[in-house]
Image: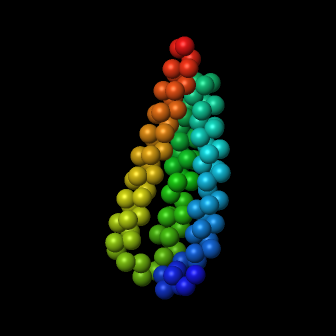
Amino acid sequence: MGLGEPYGVDPIIFGSIYVGAIPIFWLAIIWLVSNIKAKRSVTGPVLLACNCAISAYVYLIIAGENVPVWVYGLIVAIIIYAIYSTLKKVKQKKEELLNEASV
């Protein structure tokens, strides 16, 4: 619990954001699949899923004080990976649904 104190980050808030975003992320994926099936825009669900994936780290960037530079680099790497992973998952779901529709 004392780990966040020197950096002005409350671990409870960070953890709550991190864990709280998980169900919203999966709801966004369900919404995405629904939109793909209905041939509607996927922009909203993709943006929501990406925001859920990075929300805790955005809190760290905003609330953090005296955070070492390497931590920001790590956060950027995590955010890039989260966006990449989400977009990859979107593409995979879209291909699965298109394959189901053609069978």
Residue at 62% x, 24% y: name it.
Answer: 38
Which one is nearer the viewer's eye here, 40 or 75? 75
**Where is residue 45 drawn, in percent x and y?**
58, 41
Asked whether residue 40 is in view, the answer is no
Q: Image height check: is 94 above or below 80?
A: above
All told, the count of numbered labels is 0
Quarter of the image holding residue 15? bottom right
Q: Position of residue 47 (x, y in %)?
A: 53, 45
Q: Nearer the viewer, residue 97 or 61?
A: 97
The image's colour scheme reads rainbow
- Quadrant of the image for the N terminus? bottom right
x and y, in percent, of residue 49 in the image:
55, 47
Q: Quadrant of the C terminus?
A: top right
In the figure, 94 relative to 54: above or below? Answer: above
The one nearer the camera, 23 or 44, is 23
Question: Taking 102 as reference, is 78 left or right?
Answer: left
Image spot of residue 55 (x, y percent):
54, 60
Is residue 6 positioned above or below 76 on the image?
Answer: below
Question: Is residue 5 something one can see in this rendering?
Answer: yes
Q: In percent of the image, x 54 and y 77: which residue is there? A: 9
Please give the name of the residue rendered at 38% of the width and 69% of the height, measured from the top-left corner.
Answer: 72
Image position of 31 (left or right of 56) = right
Residue at the far top: name it. 103
Q: Quadrant of residue 77?
A: bottom left
At x 53%, y 38%, the residue is: 43
